[in-house]
Amino acid sequence: MGTRRVLVTGCSSGIGLAVAVRLAKDDLKRFKVVATMRNLERRQALERAAGETLDHTLEIRQLDACSEDSIRECVNSLPDRRVDVLVNNAGVGMIGPLECQSVGAMQELFNTNFFGLARLVKEVLPDMKRRQSGHIVVMSSVMGIQGLLFNDVYSASKFAVEGFCESLAVQAMKFNIKMTLVEPGPVVTEFERKVYEDAADMDLSGTDEETAKIFKQIYLPYSRKVFTSLGQTPEEVAERPSLPPPNQPAVHAPDGHEAR
């Protein structure tokens, strides 16, 4: 097997950007990276980080994980529709008292975090099966293993991702398709900063006074302290799920696990 084409989602910032650049700058030039994002107007940070790899080992394309048409258009634009490795990274967050979250907002989160993954895999899996090869890497979270206070809906979406991948891996293995779940703990990214900015301005009138107090005065300060003291950088996470050379087993990521 020669150079492998890697499709990475959510590359405008954070882990997706770091993974795309890490693979594009591989010293052995084993990967051709298709770095995607929903809004191409946010491509500047990726272009700066990609440097000389841009339009050589890394190309930027539009892909909205919430749209089957967008996903299909992106995959169809690739030579022979070939995706050797899918890195599903696109996601959104949500924290706060459950009573203050609308069902619509919960559905939007699942639309990206779970159904976005399902749409992508549904598009690339048949081709991987026909080729009898492929690798699907999914950025999950430690909260896909254990729930956390005020992260009810986000954690539920990651539990769904875990069950989906662990179940699908049984079938994928029969077609020589590897699946890897990566479960990072705290990671300091724009993603997290946006979540906490939204939380600071959250309308807590829908919950009781005690719950609002716990969220504002205990949870938020403690959570920020955890991120400050323990948070990884996106680049550190990108090093963990490094893809193996062709014809070698997938890595066991220290912050994740191989789904078998």
Image (cartoon, rainbow, N blue to C red):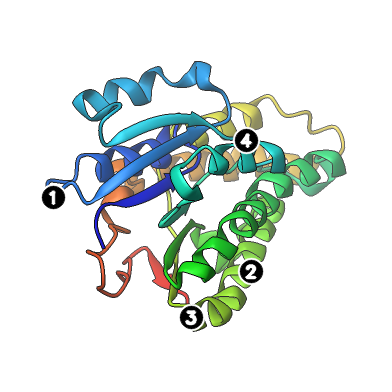
Looking at marks 4 and 2 on the same chain, the residue that comes earlier in the sequence is marked by 4
> Closer to the camera: disc 2 or disc 3?
3
Looking at marks 2 and 3 on the same chain, the residue that comes earlier in the sequence is marked by 2
Residue drawn at (38%, 49%) of the image: 6
Residue 64 — which label? Answer: 4
Looking at marks 1 and 3 on the same chain, the residue that comes earlier in the sequence is marked by 1
Residue linked to disc 1: 28
Q: Secondary structure at mark 4?
A: loop
Q: Is residue 29 above or below residue 196?
A: below
Residue linked to disc 2: 164
- The amino acid on which the numbered mark 4 sits, given as a three-letter code, is Asp
Residue 14 location in percent, x, y?
A: 41, 36
Looking at marks 1 and 4 on the same chain, the residue that comes earlier in the sequence is marked by 1
Confirm or deny contact between disc 4 and disc 2 (CB under 8 A).
no
Looking at marks 3 and 4 on the same chain, the residue that comes earlier in the sequence is marked by 4
Q: Secondary structure at mark 1?
A: loop
| CA neighbours of label 1 inside 10 A, class few (<14), some (14 to 19), many (20+) | few
Q: Quadrant of residue 199?
A: top right
Q: Is residue 60 left or right of residue 241?
A: right
Residue drawn at (29%, 20%) of the image: 48
- The amino acid on which the numbered mark 3 sits, given as a three-letter code, is Met
Looking at marks 1 and 2 on the same chain, the residue that comes earlier in the sequence is marked by 1
- The amino acid on which the numbered mark 1 sits, given as a three-letter code, is Leu
**Alpha carbons under labels 1 and 3: distance apart:** 27 Å
Q: Secondary structure at mark 2?
A: helix
- The amino acid on which the numbered mark 2 sits, given as a three-letter code, is Phe
Residue linked to disc 3: 173
Residue drawn at (79%, 39%) of the image: 105
